[in-house]
């Protein structure tokens, strides 16, 4: 949608999970075409460099997410949420606004890379099982893929959205959390608290229903 509607809200990133050397970057570059692809290696807080790097691109790669620290994920979360970049370019007197056309892809050699449980909805993991990605075959099929993507875009604009899609994607991020003892302890504590609250609420509901039945009988 961003190609047709620059600045369209899309704060997600597809993540290719696969061992190194099987053409992860080559897959993305082939899918979009070399002229529409780029790698985002600059500081995600450097708005001027980002605007210069992603301008005119359809797809940008966030490479080797396994090496991200938690602070990097916080920066990435804010970065992905932006619909446009506001920056004063070199030698300009005023701030320019650049609505984003690019979408962002992540690549990693690991399956335990997410370190911020509050932002996992933004990552759409795809675990690649191929020994080697056939980029030549992808290139041969690319026009058909984009034709189908265009048809889906038009259908989306007609139907607006598919509610169940986010739920399915969210289900796939749970196992990607990097091990964190504190998170495990907190998670276990919250589960016990929720279970206790649910039992108490069920007991209260049962008592209220019973009282209502008694009142009806007395009447």
Image (spheres, rainbow, N blue to C red):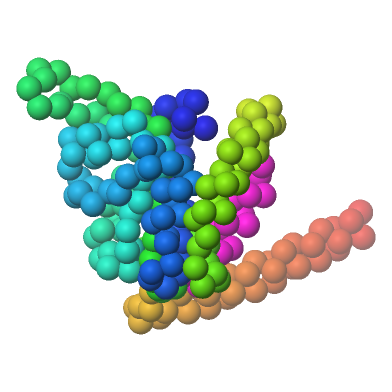
Evaluate whether residue 115 shows in this view: no
User: Which quadrant, please, contains the C terminus?
Assistant: bottom right
Pick the front one: 75 or 38: 38
Q: Is residue 10 visible in the rendered structure shown here?
A: yes
| Towards the viewer: 195 or 20 | 20
Question: Does residue 170 appear left or right of residue 39 in this picture?
Answer: right
Task: Name which quarter of the figure residue 129 lies in.
Answer: bottom right
Residue 138 percent location from the top left of the image: 55, 51
Residue at image coords 22%, 34%: 52
Range of the magenta residues?
Answer: 161-177
* Count of marks overlaid on the render: 0
Magenta-colored stretch includes residue 147: no
Residue 45, above or below 150: below
| Residue sitting at the far left | 91
Is 168 part of what is drawn in magenta? yes
Which picture quadrant has residue 216? Answer: bottom right
> Going by the image, does 115 lie left or right of 215?
left
The residue depicted at 33 percent of the width and 69 percent of the height is: 66
């Amino acid at each position: 949608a961003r190609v047709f509607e620059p600045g369209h809200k899309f704060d997600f990133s597809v993540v290719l999970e696969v061992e190194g050397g099987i053409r992860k970057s080559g897959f993305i570059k082939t899918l979009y075409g070399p002229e529409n692809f780029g790698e985002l290696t600059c500081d995600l807080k450097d708005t001027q460099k980002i605007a210069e790097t992603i301008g005119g691109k359809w797809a940008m790669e966030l490479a080797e997410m396994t090496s991200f620290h938690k602070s990097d994920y916080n920066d990435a979360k804010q970065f992905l949420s932006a619909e446009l970049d506001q920056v004063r370019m070199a030698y300009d007197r005023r701030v320019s606004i650049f609505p984003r056309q690019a979408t962002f892809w992540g690549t990693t050699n690991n399956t335990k890379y997410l370190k911020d449980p509050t932002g996992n909805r933004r990552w759409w993991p795809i675990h690649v099982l191929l020994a080697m990605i056939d980029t030549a075959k992808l290139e041969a099929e690319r026009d058909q893929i984009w034709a189908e993507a265009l048809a889906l875009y038009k259908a989306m604009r007609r139907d607006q959205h598919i509610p169940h899609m986010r739920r399915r994607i969210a289900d796939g991020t749970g196992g990607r959390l990097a091990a964190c003892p504190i998170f495990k302890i907190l998670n276990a504590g919250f589960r016990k608290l929720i279970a206790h609250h649910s039992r108490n609420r069920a007991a209260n509901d049962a008592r209220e229903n019973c009282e209502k039945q008694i009142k009806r009988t007395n009447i």
